[in-house]
Amino acid sequence: MMNKTVAACLIAACLSAPALAAEPVKVWETPGFANPESVLWDGAKKGLYVSNINGGPGDKDGNGYISKLNAEGKVVVEKWATGLDAPKGMALFKGRLYVSDIDRLVVIDTATGKVTKTYPAPGAKFLNDVTVDDKGVVYVSDMLDNVIWALNGGKFDKWLTDTQLENPNGLKAEQGRLLVASWGPMTGKGFDTAKPGALKAITLPDKMIRDLTPGFGTLDGLEPDGKGGYVVSDWVHGGVFSVSRQGKAAKLLTLGQGSADIGVLPEQKLLLVPMMMDGVVAAYRLP
């Protein structure tokens, strides 16, 4: 029989040990996409949009398109909006879907799926993520040029150029600031980086940049978690991370390479992940 003292010690050790964090649980997975880069929830229409590059991410080939899905991940219209080149990040504002497309910003009417306006970005190299603030200003990252563009009052211009952006990828506008998920400073050899990218914040009035976290990955998607923190994806290494309001990053999921511009529905505790290399979009229930 076990000594009572030993048993008591074992019980105490178990009670004092830190609980293992629960992993997100897959809810659904939909295959058949063509290099899906971004997934976006439309609360007004209770559905999802998925941008399909359908080729090289910098190729002007006219093959890109947007798919429309229902809330359960079923494809409603595979090629809902067409005629794009390599569509990536998306954002919604007042019935308009804003989509980055290499060196232009495309506006799509969500009622029809038709392109209603195109804003060229002269000299842009690789427009990537898109976000809109509460005033309707649209911000777009140019990952290869350390530039953030802004559409304001019908004019699409360079808003900020700074090497401190360290190849900006994911964007999210918040009250008084713009958050940036940096890919990391690139070496000039493909998409290789000299060091990991960090989560950054830009104060909107003065455009001051500061790091919210140390570098922890080749960062892509960025979304608030509804609890004061964020969920961030790492495209190269396939990780999805939670970032606390104190700036501490912890891995939520380990996935394959290509986990791109994620979506998060905080009220449903749902994480949406486009797997660009696998042609799949998956939904996970967050713990």
Image (cartoon, grey):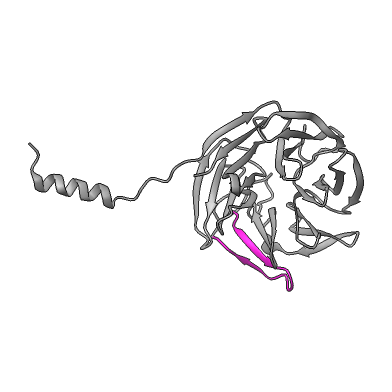
Quadrant of the drawing holding the N terminus: top left
* Residue 226, placed above or below residue 30: below
Q: Position of residue 168 (x, y in %)?
A: 69, 55
Residue at 86% x, 54% y: name it.
123
Q: Is residue 211 magenta?
A: yes
Would residue 287 appear left or right of 73 to someone viewing this image? left
Question: Is residue 68 positioned above or below 138 on the image?
Answer: above
143 vs 71, nearest the viewer: 71
Q: Position of residue 177 (x, y in %)?
A: 69, 66
Q: Looking at this rendering, what residue extends furthest in the bottom direction?
A: 206
Foreground of the two, 83 or 227: 227
Q: Residue at position x 66%, y 27% from top?
A: 31
Q: Residue 160, position in %: x, y?
A: 77, 64
Quadrant hosting residue 51? top right
Q: Percent x, y for residue 53?
A: 77, 36
Residue 93 in the magenta stretch? The answer is no
Residues in magenta, as a range = 197-213
The total number of labels drawn is 0
Quadrant housing residue 257 = top right
Farthest residue, direction top: 32
Residue at the spot x=81%, y=46% of the render? 99
Residue at x 59% of width, y 44% of height: 268
Horizontal relation, residue 127 to residue 224: left or right: right
